[in-house]
Image (cartoon, rainbow, N blue to C red):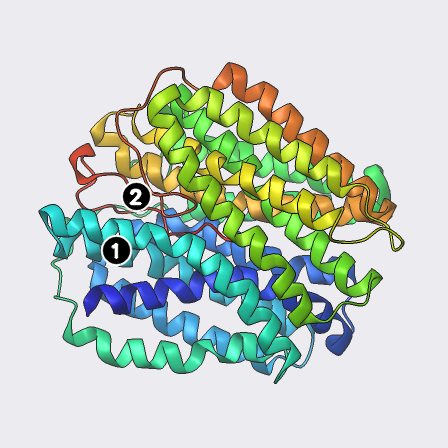
């Protein structure tokens, strides 16, 4: 029962990324939001989720997983209610940020609970179920987004979390044992705030470049680089850094963060473009869009499973390169979209091919990283990889949003080019050889307990979001 409740809570976090992608055009019409504001509706959630997730894991260690788990769930449930009731764009974006804070507390604490409560074979099975939530959440999210938006309205994409959250909040205390907090360590709050602020500045610069030009956007991008530099300095001098410089400098971690950043950026960027194109240009309804996205979400999951099998046979490097080249081919096919061309011969098959390529990239990012770092750095490395999963989504959506100012085919062509370049970089960056440990796909980046991941303090949260 504990696993069911934890997975249900995690499920809400995953669905809240995909469900909004389908509802986006309706939200824009109802609240009078432009492209820039709609971009923030997507990115604010993933920005706060990713930027604060490692801190959430550290808080679970410091104050006990149960306390942080319940706090995160309460914050996320309240934020969902505020999002559904939002009268305008500013309040909706603020609510999305609060959802991200709740998710950043909930997800690592839930995974820490699983790794603490379950042992041996039961833990392995529990982690496999946790990892599988990613693909399922992606598929259910796009369908639920279409059903709710076409039915009672987009606000119900958020309201649906409230009864689920309350049920889990009520039932969970009976099943989660009180955990003794670890020896109190200093928390790197400045580091968490700096990396979130730097990424927010980066996203803002990317969002406005389409209309404001590189002159104005360059100032924001420069400010972002400056704050990132301060973040790196803080991490070097603080006693308990969020991201240890020695870990970040390891080639497996560098390659894993790069592959994860590009894969998530491409995936959420393509969803963002496709949803707006289908509903704003072609006039498709939300339900029809959700149904069209269903094979895409399934393709991500199937690609991830295939990637997991192939990595054990041929190694991570060829899988990563092939994954990005497949994504580039799919995005290139999508560039043929036009109101005259049929969706079923251009956008949909291209998106399915691209998604099938993105799935193995997720697995490669995690498997090659976790198999090549010392056990003592497993928690930090896992937290870093999952942070870049969220931040990659934020950056990808911001970039394609600006590119779309020049037209949808042009933005899709940039996606194809970015995927091809990522494939070339992966050829030189991803470690060769077969990893010793394979892990869950998508965002369920959980490694086998044998890798020293005992209390998983800042890990993945089952996302293969579509």
Q: Up-down: is 226 above or below 249?
A: below
| Element class at badge 2 | loop
Residue, x 62% and y 82% (percent of image)?
151
Residue 187 appears at what percent x and percent y? 31, 48
- Tag 1's secondary structure? helix
Residue 200 can be seen in this image: no
172 up-or-down from 48: above or below: below
Give the image location of residue 265, x and y in percent.
59, 42
Would you say 38 lies left or right of 250 here? right
Label at residue 446: 2
The quadrant in which residue 447 appears is: top left
Task: State the CA–CA distance, disc 1 to disc 2.
Answer: 17 Å
> Is residue 6 at all visible to an observer of this figure?
yes
Mark 2 neighbour density, 10 Å: few (under 14) some (14–19) many (20 or more)? many
**In the drawing, does residue 151 fall left or right of residue 136?**
right
* Viewer-closest of 48 and 163: 163
Label 1 crowding class (10 Å Cα cut-off): few <14, some 14-19, many 20+? many
Position of the N terminus by quadrant: bottom left
Mark 1 or mark 2: which is in front? 2
Picture coordinates of residue 225, whole percent (x, y): 62, 34
Q: Do the CB atoms of the residues marked 1 and 2 lie less than 8 Å apart?
A: no
* Earlier residue among tags 1 and 2: 1
**Residue indicated by mark 1:** 60
């Amino acid at each position: 029962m504990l696993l069911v409740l934890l997975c249900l809570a995690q499920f809400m976090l995953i669905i809240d990324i995909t469900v909004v992608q389908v509802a986006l055009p309706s939200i824009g019409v109802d609240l009078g939001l432009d492209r820039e504001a709609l971009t923030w509706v997507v990115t604010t959630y993933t920005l706060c989720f990713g930027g604060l997730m490692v801190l959430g894991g550290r808080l679970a260690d410091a104050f006990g997983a149960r306390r942080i788990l319940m706090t995160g769930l309460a914050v996320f449930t309240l934020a969902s209610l505020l999002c559904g009731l939002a009268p305008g764009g500013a309040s909706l974006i603020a609510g999305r940020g609060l959802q991200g804070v709740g998710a950043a507390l909930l997800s690592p604490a839930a995974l820490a609970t699983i790794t603490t409560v379950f042992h041996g074979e039961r833990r392995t099975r529990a982690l496999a179920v946790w990892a599988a939530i990613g693909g399922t959440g992606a598929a259910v999210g796009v369908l639920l987004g279409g059903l709710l938006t076409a039915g009672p309205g987009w606000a119900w994409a958020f309201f649906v979390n409230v009864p689920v959250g309350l049920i889990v909040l009520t039932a969970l205390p009976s099943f989660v044992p009180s955990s003794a907090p670890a020896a109190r360590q200093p928390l790197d709050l400045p580091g968490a705030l700096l990396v979130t602020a730097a990424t927010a500045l980066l996203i803002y610069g990317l969002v406005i470049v389409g209309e404001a030009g590189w002159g104005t956007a360059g100032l924001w991008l420069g400010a972002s680089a400056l704050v990132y530099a301060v973040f790196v300095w803080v991490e070097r001098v603080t006693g308990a850094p969020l991201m240890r410089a020695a870990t970040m400098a390891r080639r497996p971690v560098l390659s894993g963060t790069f592959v994860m950043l590009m894969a998530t950026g491409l995936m959420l960027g393509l969803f963002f473009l496709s949803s707006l194109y289908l509903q704003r240009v072609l006039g498709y309804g939300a339900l029809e869009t959700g149904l069209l996205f269903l094979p895409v979400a399934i393709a991500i999951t199937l690609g991830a499973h295939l990637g997991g099998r192939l990595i054990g046979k041929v190694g991570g490097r060829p899988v990563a390169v092939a994954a990005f080249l497949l994504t580039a081919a799919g995005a290139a096919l999508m560039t043929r979209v036009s109101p005259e061309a049929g969706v079923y011969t251009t956008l949909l098959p291209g998106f399915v091919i691209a998604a099938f390529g993105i799935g193995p990239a997720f697995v490669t990012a995690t498997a090659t990283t976790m198999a090549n770092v010392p056990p003592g750095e497993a928690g930090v490395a896992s937290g870093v990889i999952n942070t870049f999963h969220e931040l990659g989504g934020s950056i990808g959506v911001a970039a394609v949003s600006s590119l779309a100012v020049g037209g949808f085919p042009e933005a899709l062509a940039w996606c194809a080019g970015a995927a091809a370049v990522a494939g070339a970089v992966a050829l030189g960056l991803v470690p060769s050889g077969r990893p010793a440990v394979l892990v869950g796909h998508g965002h369920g980046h959980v490694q086998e307990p044998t890798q020293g991941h005992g209390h998983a303090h800042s890990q993945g949260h089952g996302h293969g979001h579509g």
